[in-house]
Amino acid sequence: MTANPKTLRTVERAGVIFDLLVSTEHNAFPVIVEDPTFGSRFFAGVILRKQLNVMLSHHDFSIEKPTPFHRQPHPASYQPDVASIGTLRHRRSRDLEANKTPRVDDKLLESPLASNYCLSYHDMENHYPRYPIPTPMHQGFQAAAHAGCIAGDELYTLLEEDRALWVDLTPYMNQTPYLIQEEAPFVRAYRLFRSAGLRHLVVVNRHNNVRGIITRRELEEEHCARCFRLVKNIDMDDVYPLSGAPPVGFFRKMRHKISRTEQVKRALINSTSIARDGESENERDTTLNELLSH
């Protein structure tokens, strides 16, 4: 389990979301709400990375802080011949970047009515399979965007004046994902991943506060075997943290089974009764071989 994962609030600043997408490669983020009774990390749902990218690329944010759980897709989004609010927002952002001239649809988008609607499912999945990619604003952004268009990728950035705007995550987040208590056994989490085909599993405590997140990689056989050896103090050569990425060739080395004799040797080496000050490695190995031969 990765403790204290990156989280987002139900209504978050656009700059916070953009920086999180640029600095991480996580596929999903727990959404929390500050509850005065149960704590500051009260679980509200899970939102995917692709959803956040589409929201920012469509400029789905507002100046005033919106009220959570109040927005719905525009009725026009259910009609195939009528452009939805999300499509109009996307067209507006592209036209402003290209021509610096507003469209006729700007009056609709700037009205209070438009802020009451969110992106539709068609808007969210219209980018499949190449979802927008966040790119920091720098001098070479135009060249990177041009190269991305040639490669088929849609790059987007966030202007400095848009970083303080508010983004409402409640219409898009999954409010009923699979959860598991932090006291639950390992077998239960493993069965959930196997039976439901999960990619991530949020861990909460009895007060429904986010405590961590479990991914598929953390349930792989090699990773579980490594965690078992660390708990039992069998492998003393392991130095990298559980939540970090392993060094190159680590798992290849770990596939080599440690024999019972080698385990006893390591235990004797780390024992204060056997290890003596000033003793060389050759003398220590000789002593161990003598002990094991009896």
Image (spheres, rainbow, N blue to C red):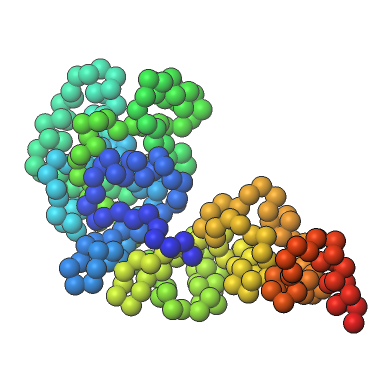
- 247 vs 252, left or right, is left
Residue furthest to the top: 99
Placement of 243 over or under 117, stated as above or below: below
Placement of 241 over or under 208, stated as above or below: above
Picture quadrant where residue 53 is located: top left
For the question of whether residue 210 can be seen, the reply is: yes
Between residue 92 and residue 285, name the one nearer to us.
285
Residue furthest to the front: 278
Between residue 289 and residue 52, name the one nearer to us.
289
**How far across and down, in percent of the image, does residue 113 sit?**
10, 43
Placement of 234 over or under 240, stated as above or below: below
Between residue 80 and residue 174, name the one nearer to us.
174
Between residue 85 and residue 207, name the one nearer to us.
207
**Residue under the point 44% across and 78% down:** 183
**Residue under the point 22% across and 52% down:** 11
**How far across and down, in percent of the image, does residue 44 sit?**
28, 64
**How far across and down, in percent of the image, does residue 108 sit?**
13, 35
- 101 vs 141, left or right, is left
- 104 vs 90, left or right, is left
**Residue under the point 61% across and 63% down:** 223
**Which quarter of the rendered picture does the C terminus lie within?**
bottom right
